[in-house]
Image (spheres, rainbow, N blue to C red):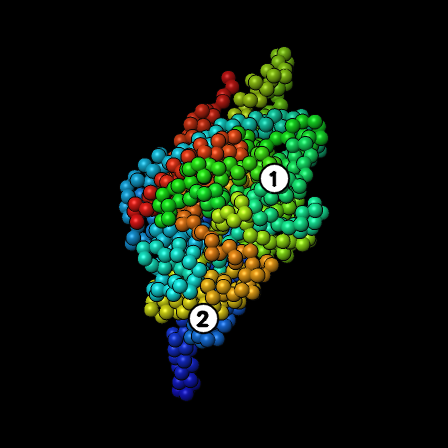
Amino acid sequence: MKKLPLGLSQREALWAYAFLALPLAFFLFIRIWPALQAFQISFYQWHADPSQRQFIGLANYWRMFHDPRFLQALRNTLFYTLLGVPAEVTFALAIALLLNSVGKRFRALFRAIYFAPYVTPPVAVAWTWFMLLNPHRGVVNRVLVALGLPPQPFLSDPATALPTVTAVVVWQFLGFHVLIFLAGLQNIPQMYYEAAQIDGAHGWRLFRYITLPLLKPMIAVSVLMATAGPSIGFLQLFTHVINLTWQNPGGPLGSTLTVLLYMYERAFGAFEMGYGAAIVVFLFFILALISLIEFKVLGRKVEYR
Amino acid sequence: MKRKSLIVFLLVSFVALYGLSKVTITYWQYFYETRVNAIDLLIKEFEKENPDIDVVQETFPYEAFQQRVAAAIPAGKGPEVITLYYGWLPTWKRAGYVKPLPFTPDEAAFVPLIQVAKMEGKYWGLPTAVRSLALIYNKDMFDEAGVPAAPTTWEEFVEIGQKLTIKRGPMIIRAGFGIAPQGQDHHLVREVLIRQFGGQPYSDDYCQVMYDSPEGAAALKFYTDLQLKYEIGDVDFVANYRDGFIAGDIGMIIDGSFAIGTILKGAQFKVGFAELPVLEPGGTKANFASFWMHALTPRAYESEEKLEAAVKFLKFITSERAMRLWLEVVGELPARLTLIEDPELAQDPIYGPFIRALPYSYATRFYDEIAQRRIMLDAIDRVLKEGMDPADSLKIAAAEEQKILDEYCVSK
């Protein structure tokens, strides 16, 4: 067999490309290509037979902004994000700080406890909470009543349903963010604290001027993931909502409806794939825009002089 | 050597010819054990009579069914014959997922409500079975509370409901009635109560919303009063009204005939069935009926042989014989008049109430079922959860629903 006239490094590179080819092809044909197709479909009136798809320009987009239910879904999704992301990140940071100050053995235990919900399937989480939160028979209200407190409607009242869903999602994904912050905290050199302490700083000032700035990259990752992360970002909320409100998805009165859930309803419930595609394309731009803003704001490097 | 190749040649050509002469068609429905079994039995009989046709049944979980169909048909995959909920027909038809039947069925042989499967003068599918609603009650609970018989008027219904309900503070321990708008009750309000209160939910062609009326408001008020005023149940009492009934936490539910099997299999008590109550003795009767229909996809039209085979199979599973088997195996009411009019069936303690209701049943002509269902749920929720006046709530619903009807009725 004739050897290719390649140097060692070139041959290594070739191997690397060979190994990369498969995942690359996967990404191109399974993820990128269909995503691009969604752009195309969004300009058409959907029909099962491709030859009968009618080009309708921006009609699907026009419809979107005149569809009160879509606008409600959009409002809700932004509200979920505004409520959920800060809650998720702050709670996670607080818990990580607490865990960082307890002994090593306990830290591992608590870390596992906080991480457990994250590795539980969202459907199982949603159904468990659905039962726990039942107004008449759920454990939560039984406890409340036993304590002499009034029972709460939780998911059944349009006013409390969205915050309730948010709470369940925060509960599930908290552990993921705790882990990010713990890693970040353990990377902060102890000497900064020691130096600051010698200068007389402690408590809040240590946190404000050392921990927080040095955690900034972690906060950026955490906020980005909580906002737009695949399957855990609030802008892509779907599984939790459809399972927590399975009898009337997005209800009561559309109060928990999200953009993705509405897309699903139109595309797969009414076979309006063109309209569904338009909704997804719009969501794509929102995701890109918000991620970009967050990245600009949080991505700046911290430097100590 | 020569002889060997000749044998191989003959064998290959035989297999090829045999394969060519045999048509394979695929049939899809969502997974429901008894229905899958029934179709399996029917396929076996059908193949015996039609040795040149192979039928393959494929099923999917209910939640994934529409999703699979949505993707498969445009990709040129999927079945030739498919079973869909009648309410989905307009959206499926508009998106080109089903094609009209190439023959005219004998309308007079079927129950009249199959006419909703007719659009633009053509039939787009036929059912094996139809379903209607009835009152289903826990007989043991009735005995215990000293209730001698099922209610025939709504007044009696409320009275019994109150006897059966047990509350502790604001929380319900046992509900007299399993209020379930998201179950069958949105049909109950739309097609039963509004008509019983003297109104009409839609114009006869279902192009005009008409429930936005004093009668409609009275009907919705009565329904929501079951929770708000008479307190015989609560929409949030249990996750699923049927499961709650089976568990013995609910005294009465209104459910479709498709639930008979599940309920009888699960209930540890005597179950009673009765026709839906009316407003006053001799008052207007009304019921909601529905069906799943077998239809042809564009794939059936791919070749003449396939179309012929698919039509044969569709006719077979909607024949009288198939319906008898279906009733036995699945427990669903047959869709042919000859069977419905069987006096023995009409007097059956279980099927009777459902069958007797068929002559006065209405099948809502839905245009965008998922949206129209949600609009009625919202109309109920606005009263139950936000305290809105029923008339105002129906006004909002009517405006919303009329937009959907306009889109279809005008474009038709």
* Nearer to the camera, A162 or B153: B153
Q: Which mark is residue B233?
A: 1
| Up-down relation of residue A303 to residue B283 (above or below) | above
Q: Quadrant of the N terminus of chain B?
A: bottom left
Q: Is residue B373 left or right of residue B32?
A: left
Provide residue A147's location: percent of width, then percent of height.
Answer: 71, 28
For the point 58% across and 37% down, the residue is B227
Provide residue B19's location: percent of width, then percent of height.
Answer: 41, 74
Provide residue B35's location: percent of width, then percent of height.
Answer: 53, 61
Q: Is residue A56 left or right of residue B98?
A: left
For the point 39% across and 81% down, the residue is B9
Which residue lies under the disc numbered 2?
B54
Q: Nearer the viewer, mark 1 or mark 2?
A: 1
* Nearer to the camera, A70 or B128: B128
Secondary structure of the residue carrying numbered label 1: loop
Q: In the picture, residue B105 is in which quadrant?
A: bottom left
**Please, what is the three-letter code of the amino acid marked with disc 1?**
Gly
Q: Is there a contact, CB below 8 Å, between mark 1 and mark 2?
A: no
* Nearer to the camera, A109 or B230: B230
For the point 49% across and 60% down, the residue is B129
- Which chain is home to disc 2? B
For the point 41% across and 80% down, the residue is B14
* Residue B232 visible in the picture: yes
* Residue B12 visible in the picture: no
Q: Residue B241 carries which label?
A: none
Furthest toward the top, the residue is A200
| Up-down relation of residue B298 to residue B218 (above or below) | below
Q: Is residue B304 left or right of residue A195?
A: left
* Nearer to the camera, A39 or B199: B199
**Please, what is the three-letter code of the amino acid marked with disc 2?**
Asp
Provide residue A82's location: percent of width, then percent of height.
Answer: 49, 27
Check chain identity for marks 1 and 2: say if they share one.
yes
